[in-house]
Image (spheres, rainbow, N blue to C red):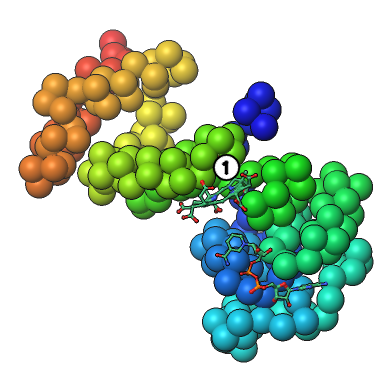
Amino acid sequence: MLDTPFYIACLKLTGRRCVVVGGGEIGLEKVEGLLACDARVVLIAPDANAELQRLAEEGSIEWVRKRYERGDLEHTFMAIAATNDTDVNIAVYNDAEARAMLVNVVDVPPLCNFILPAIVRVGPLAIAISTAGASPALAKRMKTQIAETYGEEYARLAVMLNDVRGWAKGTLPTYQDRKAFFEDIVNGDPDPIELIRNGDEAAVLELIAAAQRAHEPTTA
Ligand SMILES: C[C@@]1(CC(=O)O)C2=NC(=C\c3[nH]c(c(CCC(=O)O)c3CC(=O)O)Cc3[nH]c(c(CC(=O)O)c3CCC(=O)O)/C=C3\N/C(=C\2)[C@@H](CCC(=O)O)[C@]3(C)CC(=O)O)/[C@H]1CCC(=O)O
Ligand SMILES: NC(=O)c1ccc[n+]([C@@H]2O[C@H](COP(=O)([O-])OP(=O)(O)OC[C@H]3O[C@@H](n4cnc5c(N)ncnc54)[C@H](O)[C@@H]3O)[C@@H](O)[C@H]2O)c1
């Protein structure tokens, strides 16, 4: 799989039907990942572990208590198979592929048209690490190391920069102007990340205000 050039993207799952087939520990892991992204999760499995049953009872997921059938993929955006039956996993893959649907069979690369990276999430930041299947264990180790480097201060700066995007789009006429404005702040002196680390958000706001003054077109 190392010669597969994977196209990395961020999917919007909000409100979309995502089907998980298999109600064991691994099925639960996948359900939780999808719920964290506001997907409409449908679990297909004749039995499910206690936590999945709880999620179904509280209405967080729909549990269809039966064995998988092709029709379960109707109107579905993504399917993830996590059963202990290879024939079922192959059927899910074939049925999803026939509909050009996104499909992942956990830990079976030939039955995936997308694979899952290890992810570091902090606020709006998401850093994905993929080894193209070469070593999930290494991806997991890197996740820990990256999480130590890119913490809350980066997430906070992202939010502060988002707050000024409206001003930039409304005030700075060209893409180049907006690019220069944001790069001045992000790579600014003093370093905004260091300022946030030291608890001095007021100085970051001042850095942003100074960039606004420097980049605002003159009306004369
Ligand atoms: C990242 C992560 C995300 C997630 O699952 O959400 C993920 N696997 C994780 C953990 C993990 N998986 C395995 C181990 C044992 C150690 C090891 O083998 O390294 C550990 C470590 C552990 O469990 O601690 C075993 C394993 N995994 C695959 C195979 C098949 C094969 O090698 O042929 C085998 C051998 C099975 C066997 O030997 O029988 C295949 C895949 N696993 C992927 C993703 C995709 C490639 C990702 C990439 O590298 O780009 C891919 C291709 C398909 C997919 O499943 O999407 C998650 C870390 C989550 C986190 O902690 O953040
Ligand atoms: N548990 C682990 O740590 C782990 C790690 C890596 C890979 N795996 C593999 O991932 C798979 C899932 O692991 P698990 O621990 O969640 O397994 P599990 O045995 O606990 O759960 C399997 C689930 O699949 C369901 N299932 C079986 N046939 C089905 C069908 N026809 N339609 C719908 N659902 C069906 C079962 O009802 C059960 O809910 C297994 O193949 C396992 O070898 C497990």
Which residue lies under the disc numbered 1?
10
Which residue is rendered at x = 55% and y = 61% of the image? 33
- Viewer-proximal residue among 110 and 100: 110
- Mark 1: secondary structure: loop
Above or below 167: residue 48: below
Disc tally is: 1
- Viewer-proximal residue among 190 and 72: 72
Could you say where residue 49 lies in the image, as x and y percent from the top left?
A: 61, 82
Could you say where residue 171 lies in the image, as x and y percent from the top left?
A: 38, 26
Quarter occupied by the N terminus: top right
For residue 127, side relative to residue 131 (left or right): left
Which residue is rendered at x = 75% and y = 76% of the image? 45
Q: Mark 1: few, some, or many residues within 10 Å (few <14, many ≥20)?
A: few
For residue 211, side relative to residue 127 (left or right): left
- Viewer-proximal residue among 17 and 188: 17
Which residue is rendered at x = 52% and y = 40% of the image? 135
Q: Quadrant of residue 59?
A: bottom right
Which residue is rendered at x = 29% and y = 14% of the image? 218
Quarter occupied by the C terminus: top left
- Viewer-proximal residue among 139 and 122: 139
The reply to whether residue 201 is visible in this rendering is yes
Q: Amino acid at mark 1?
A: Cys
For residue 216, side relative to residue 178 (left or right): left
Could you say where residue 10 lies in the image, as x and y percent from the top left?
A: 57, 42
The reply to whether residue 126 is visible in this rendering is no
Above or below 75: residue 209: above
Could you say where residue 89 lies in the image, as x and y percent from the top left?
A: 79, 59
Q: Quadrant of residue 105?
A: bottom right
Q: Residue furthest bottom?
A: 57
Q: Residue furthest top?
A: 220
